[in-house]
Image (spheres, rainbow, N blue to C red):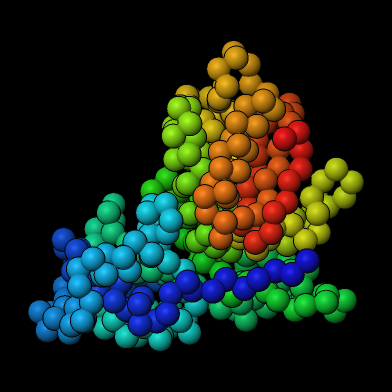
C-alpha cells in the first residue's frame, strides 16, 4: 500500500499571509520561555513588523479566506504541523519567534493559549536512529524494510512533552489524545499526526449533531501507533502490518456523553451495541460525501469485555469499508 507524504496544503506565500492575519488578531504577545519543550509564544510584535506583514493587495475577505484554510473545512483546527525545512521557509514565523522555530521542535503560539493558533515544529524523520528518538521506542516503519516496494515514510515527529501535551490542536482534541498507549513514563514522546484526520473527526462530530444526535465528546481509543507497538498485535484477527495508525491518518473513536468512558446510546434504543457504531459510521460517510478530499476508511468493531463498540476512521485517500456497516 502506498503511503502518501503529508504535504502542506498552502503555498508558502498564502501561509505567510495567513500567519500575518493571525498575528493581527492576537490580543496579547509574550516572550517565549527558554526551556526546551515548553510552549513558545510570539513576542510583542512591533508596529513595523505587523505593518510589513499585513502589506498586501488582498482585501479583508481574502485574508480571512487564508485563515479559514488554515483552520480546515471544519473551521476548528488550531494547529499546523511543520517540518524544520518548512518552518525555515516562512519568514514571518522566523520574525515572530526567531531562528529556533526552524531549529528546535516545539509549540509556537500566536495569541493566548485558549484561542490562539499553534505552529508546531516537528523533529525530522532522520532523528530516529535504530528505531528510537532518545529513550522513546518507535521501531521501523513497513516502508523502511528492504523488501518494501516504496520507501515512503512520515515527514517527521511531533515532540510531546509533559508541558505541551494538553495543547489544543483542534477545538475538541489535544496532542495527548493521539499518543501511542505505551511507554507511560518516558518523556518526551513522539507522535505522527496529519491535520486532515483532525479535520475529519471534527466534521464527524458536527455531523452527528446536525443529525439530531447528542454527541458531547468524540473519544480517541487508538490514534498513532508506533510500528514497534503495532507489531505486538499483528496476526489473525488483530492489527495489520501496514496499519494506517502508524502514519498518523487514522483513529479508532467512539462517542461519550456521560461519565462512563464507553460508547453512548446513539440510536436511543436503550442498548449500546454495533447499531450505535453504525450511526457514527453513517456520520463519517456523510462527511466524505460532502468533502471527498477526506475520503478514507470506515470500519465498525464490536464490543468486547475490555471496550465498547467503536469506529475506525481514516483519511487514506481511497474508499475502504469493513465491519457490520
Q: Position of residue 152 (x, y in %)?
A: 70, 76
Residue furthest out toward the left: 47
Q: What residue lies at 65% left-to-right and 71% top-to-bottom?
A: 4
Looking at the rendered structure, the number of numbered marks drawn on it comes to: 0
Residue in the image at 19% along x and 78% along y: 54
Image quarter where the N terminus lies is: bottom right
Q: Is residue 247 above or below residue 278?
A: below
Q: Is residue 263 visible?
A: yes
Judge from the rendering whether residue 215 lies leftward or rightward of residue 279; answer left or right.
Answer: left
Work out whether 280 lies above or below 45.
above
Q: Position of residue 60 (x, y in %)?
A: 19, 68
Please identify the quadrant where the C terminus is shown: top right
Residue shown at 65% from the left, 32% from the top: 278
Q: In front: 103, or 315?
A: 315
Q: Name the residue located 28 percent from the left edge and 59 percent from the top edge.
A: 116
Residue 228: quadrant of the picture? bottom right
Q: As drawn, is 95 to the left or to the right of 36?
A: left
Q: Is residue 215 above or below residue 167?
A: above
In this rendering, the answer to whether 316 lies above or below 147 is: above
Residue reaching furthest front? 289
Q: Considering depth in this image, is 178 or 13 the residue closer to the camera?
A: 13
Q: Position of residue 240 (x, y in %)?
A: 81, 54
Q: Position of residue 95 (x, y in %)?
A: 26, 83
Amino acid at each position: 500500500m502506498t503511503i502518501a507524504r503529508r504535504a502542506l496544503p498552502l503555498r508558502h506565500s498564502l501561509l505567510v499571509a495567513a500567519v500575518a492575519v493571525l498575528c493581527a488578531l492576537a490580543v496579547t504577545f509574550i516572550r517565549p520561555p527558554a526551556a526546551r519543550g515548553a510552549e513558545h509564544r510570539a513576542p510583542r510584535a512591533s508596529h513595523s513588523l505587523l505593518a510589513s506583514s499585513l502589506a498586501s493587495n488582498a482585501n479583508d475577505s481574502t485574508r480571512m479566506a487564508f485563515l479559514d484554510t488554515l483552520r480546515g473545512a471544519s473551521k476548528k483546527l488550531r494547529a499546523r504541523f511543520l517540518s524544520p525545512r518548512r518552518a525555515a521557509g516562512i519568514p514571518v514565523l522566523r520574525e515572530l519567534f526567531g531562528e529556533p522555530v526552524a531549529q528546535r521542535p516545539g509549540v509556537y503560539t500566536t495569541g493566548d493559549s485558549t484561542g490562539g493558533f499553534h505552529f508546531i515544529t516537528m523533529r525530522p524523520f532522520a532523528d530516529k536512529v535504530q528505531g528510537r528518538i532518545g529513550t522513546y521506542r518507535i521501531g521501523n516503519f513497513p516502508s523502511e524494510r528492504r523488501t518494501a516496494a516504496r520507501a515512503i515514510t512520515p515527514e517527521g515527529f511531533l515532540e510531546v512533552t509533559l508541558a505541551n501535551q494538553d495543547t489544543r490542536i483542534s477545538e475538541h482534541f489535544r496532542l495527548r489524545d493521539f499518543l501511542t498507549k505505551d511507554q507511560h513514563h518516558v518523556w518526551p514522546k513522539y507522535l505522527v499526526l496529519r491535520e486532515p484526520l483532525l479535520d475529519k473527526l471534527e466534521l464527524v462530530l458536527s455531523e452527528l449533531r446536525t443529525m439530531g444526535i447528542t454527541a458531547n465528546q468524540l473519544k480517541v481509543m487508538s490514534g498513532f501507533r508506533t510500528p514497534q507497538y503495532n507489531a505486538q498485535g499483528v496476526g489473525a484477527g488483530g492489527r495489520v502490518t501496514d496499519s494506517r495508525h502508524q502514519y498518523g491518518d487514522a483513529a479508532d473513536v467512539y462517542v461519550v456523553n456521560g461519565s462512563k468512558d464507553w460508547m453512548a446510546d446513539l440510536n436511543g434504543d436503550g442498548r449500546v451495541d454495533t447499531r450505535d457504531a453504525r450511526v457514527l459510521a453513517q456520520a463519517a460517510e456523510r462527511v466524505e460525501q460532502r468533502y471527498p478530499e477526506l475520503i478514507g476508511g470506515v470500519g465498525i468493531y464490536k464490543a468486547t469485555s475490555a471496550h465498547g463498540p467503536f469506529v475506525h476512521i481514516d483519511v487514506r485517500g481511497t474508499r475502504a469499508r469493513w465491519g457490520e456497516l
